[in-house]
Structure formats: C-alpha cells, structure tokens
Amino acid sequence: MRLSNLFGKTLRQTPAEAENISHQLLLKAGMINQLAAGVYSYLPLAFNVQSYRDLPLLLYQIQTKFRDEPRPRGGLMRVREFGMKDLYSFDANEECLNTTYQKLITAYKRIYERCGLDFVVVEADSGAIGGKESHEFMVLAESGEDIILSCSKCDYAANVEKAESVKPEGKTGEMLQIEQVATPGRVTIEEVANFLNVPEIQTLKAVFYAADGVMVFVAIRGDIEVNEVKLKNALGCHELRLATEDEVSNAGLVAGSASPLGLSGIKRIGDPSIALGANLVAGGNKPDTHLRNVNYPRDFAIDLMVDIATARAGEGCPICGAPLIAKKGIEVGHVFKLGSFFTERMGATFLDRDGVAYPILMGCYGIGIGRLLAAAIEQNHDEKGIIWPIPIAPYQVHLCPLSSDNQEVVTKVENLYAELTREGLEVIFDDREESPGVKLNDADLLGMPLRVVLSPRSLKSGSVELKMRCKKEAVLVPLDGASREITAMLPSK
RNA sequence: CGGGGCGUAGCGCAGUCCGGUUAGCGCGCAGCGUUCGGGACGCUGAGGUCGGAGGUUCAAAUCCUCUCGCCCCGACCA
C-alpha cells in the first residue's frame, strides 16, 4: 500500500476535543472521524476532499444491506438482506472518471474470472439514480432472471432493458388512402392481424400508460413489445404502469380499437418502428373498427419520437447489424457512472488548480456477494454436488480417511492433517466414524477442489489417493512427500 | 401487492375430502453386536403444543373463521 493511495489524512495539530490519548491519536492519525456525539466512522468522510491533488480517490466497503426485497426467491439468489461489496470512485473530470470506470471494469472482470465464472459484461439501464453509463456483470445461467442480448459477430451485449436493435422493415410502397374496416370482436393485434389477413408487422399498436398518474399514449409497430424501462426513462417519471380500463375509457379512448389519429389532449409517444413500413392497420377509435393504410407522419402526429422498443433475438445488432442472440443471466455486479448526481446535491466539491470549486464526479461499483456465491454454484456443480472453483472454495483439501478403526490409518491421517495444515493449506478433515460410502458422497457434495483419501487399501502400497473434484480420475502418490504433491496440485490463491 | 401450493418428530412425507382406538411411515438420532472403497445390517430405544388463536361438536390433525410463516408464478427491483 502506498501512503499516497491511503484515504486517511493525518492532522498536524491535535484536535482540542480529544482528552485521552487513544482518542487524540486516532483522530490525528486520520483513522476515525466524529459524526455525532458518540458516533464515529472508522475513516474520515469522503466529502472532506478539498483538492484536485487528492483525486482520484477510491473507497470500498463490505457490509450488509437490508432492502426488504419485495419478492425474495431462489435461496441466495434474491434475498431481503444481503452482503454487498461496493466501491465509490471520486474524480476531477469526465476523462479521469472514464479511466477509473474502465479500470474498475477490468478489475471486476478479473474477480469473476478468478471465481471460475462464465460471464459477460453488458450495457445496462442505470436505474432511478440516472447516470450516464452503466454496465452489469452477468453470469450465464438458465436460472437467471435477466435477459441478455448479445451480438453473434461483434462484442455488443446489453440487458434487454437497455438493448437496442435494428428491426426488420415492413412492407413499403406507395401510401394508399385510408379505409375503414369492420373488425367485430377483434381486440388484440393478433386477432386483428389474423382477421384482416395481414402480418403483425403491418399493424400499429396503441398502448396506454399512467405515468405518475398522467395518461400517456404510446404508438409502436404491432409486432414489437413496449420496453417499459426505456419508456420510463423517456418520460422521466417515477411510477409507470398500464392504464386501467376505466382510465382509458374516461379519456375518451376505445381499448382494442384505439388510434393515434385525431388524438388530442394527451401526450403521444412514438417508437421509430412506426415509420418502418407503409400502409399499416391501426385502430379506428370506434368499437369493432380499424383503419387500413395508416401512414406516419401523413395521418397523425406524435409529441416525442424515441426508441421504446423491446429488442429480440434475431434482430440486428445496433453496431454491426449481425443477428442478436438472447441468453439468460444472473446479475452479480453492477457499475455506474454517477457523475455529479449526488455530489451536486450534497455540495461535495474540490478545488482545481485555479482554486475554483467543482462537484466531484462519482462512480459506483457493486458486487452482490451472496448472489455471487449462488451463481458460482449454479455454474459449477454436478449430480453429486458442488464443484468449488479453487479461489472461492471454503477449503482447498478434503482429507478423508476410510476405516477409522484401523490404527495405522488413524495415526497416518492425523500426521498428514498436521503436515498439510503446517504447509498453510486449508484442510477439512472428515474424522467422523462413518462408512466409506457416506464419507465419499459427502466429499463430492461439499465439493472441495482436492480430495485426499487414506485407507488400508492405499496404505498397502504406502500411498494416498489424490483426486481433483473437477476430474474423473484419481492418482496414487507415496504417502512420504504427499504434501509436496498436494501443494503442487493447488495453484496458490 | 395479486394468483397458486404447503405448514403433522431433527429431515422427507402419509393421514385431512368423509371428525371417532394410544397420530403413523422412511431417513436421521441413542445403545449393543456384526460390517468397512461409493449413502451397510440386525435387535432395542428416545423423540409430536399436528404453525398459532378462536369457534362448531359428546369428540377436531380432520369442519368453520381469523391469523402467522414458507415455496412457486406475476407485479416490483441501483
């Protein structure tokens, strides 16, 4: 550790508030900071930063978060209280923040690699706190609750909440005159498309939302689903939900046959897909009635055109156009460029070279520890049990004597246990009086990287048996010098 | 918060519909003996507010009302 990287700052004078020597020295050494009477933080506050010369600054914490998750599920996957390692970065300008952000993405990637995880870094929605850029670390697993779209050619990858795509174009051609058609009882896009014998891509979907209680009209091509995260961001609202039937009819609209034509007094949002194709089928704003040959912008106007489409597998990558692929992932880390979102509000500034105060630019970087553990097991197991990746295994070695009433086995395994421990290895020793089947099955279940079996059978040849949990075969090595072999099989942590 | 399922011995369950001996079974646990390289066997034994409260009844694990908890699906989710 370099002192220049250490966050604490020593004081030149002894603070007058301190009476006893430990208090004085702790304060003076910069190890504690008083928050209130009888309340101390173990390091000074981040917002004591005064000079650009103290930046960049990185602070991390590992602590329990209580979030009272509304939907706990899946064991450690989704819990109400969880351990989180997070880090906050403080930079003087955009360029430095970018550098810090990239460095931390690299560092986090290394963490997940060492955990033995198959993961991808994806572009993510930055959520309620905003922020310019955000990435998630996704462990690929069928049990994952997030959908990832990644390019089959280039390295574009994004959470479906954020993902963009190139949509297929509908039929184009000369714009025809609007025709009214009867569509008795047909309400959904699927029903209308089937009834009129047109593909869904040739239809226009109208959806109504309540955004912080205000009605919003959304127009999107019929084959595409609205991405509510994108819509929420576009509207800048806190609460977004589908409008209720009453809200729709009170606004003078006809659910199932709603149309952007002739709308007024309501905010209209359009997805660019409505311009990809000509002569669409849209609602007629009368029950059981639709319109053919509706064209944007010839026939209706909107107030805001913005991408609010849900991307799907098979659509084009926004970078290179190659088809996108969908996978499921478990979010085990999330990083954000917060910028000055918090620091402006809290007056956390620094003085630049010219003595002018600017808000510090922040980043935040979190890893869910329990979920990481669960994700590691989702990916590393077989029908017998866990297969711990070495760096996160609770113990490196599972020492397993068979025949615990055999005096020779007992003596030699105790010696081996002592020796391995002395070598600095982490050893779990199965000293229970259990049958071989029970012990071996438990060894597979617990899944420590290396299993060491000592038995009358192996002792006949003066050997112990070594088996990596991730491999099928075991090897016999001489008991003498076994600890060297064992150490050699385990890359140091 | 909505929809579904489940709470009976440490664990896994049967019994509940149709109320009626002392609430069973498997695993585990304790003791003794045999066994000992892939979840051994025999004998003996311990272990229960049937999630909780109220009600109906001569009688409630079982019927009714309320309530708590857990699991799954959906809403939600730095």
Image: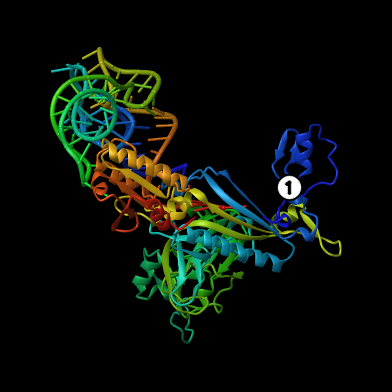
Residue drawn at point x = 51 percent, y = 50 percent? A369
Classify mark 1: residues with Cα within 10 Å, few (<14), some (14-19) or many (20+). Answer: some
Question: Where does the image place residue A343, in percent across and percent down from the top left?
Answer: 73, 55
Drawn side of residue A100 relative to residue B72, left or right: right
Residue B71, how many percent across, how many down? 38, 43
Q: Position of residue A149 (x, y in %)?
A: 46, 68
Which quadrant does the N terminus of chain A fall into? bottom right
Residue A263 makes an appearance in the image: no
- The amino acid sitting under disc 1 is Leu
Task: Looking at the picture, tell me which residue is in the foreground, B21 or B47.
Answer: B47
The secondary element bearing badge 1 is classed as loop
Q: How many marks?
A: 1
Task: Relative to A212, say whether A93 is above or below.
Answer: below
- Residue placed furthest toward the bottom: A174
> Which colour style is shown?
rainbow
| Front-lying residue, A65 or A247 | A65
Using the rendered image of the protein, determine whether residue A273 is visible from the camera's viewpoint.
yes
Residue where numbered disc 1 is placed: A45
Lateral position of residue A261 relative to residue B8, left or right:
right
Name the residue located 25 percent from the left edge and 51 percent from the top edge.
A461
User: In this orientation, which residue lies closer to the viewer: A415 or B13?
Assistant: A415
Q: Residue at x 34, y 42 (%)?
A: A413
Can you say whether A224 is above or below B31 in the image?
below
Q: In the picture, residue A237 is in which quadrant?
A: bottom right
Q: Chain of mark 1?
A: A
Q: Residue at x 73, y 49 (%)?
A: A8
Measured as percent of width and height from the top left, residue A50 is found at 80, 55
In front of the other: A11 or A119: A11
On screen, residue A194 versus residue A343, left or right, reads left
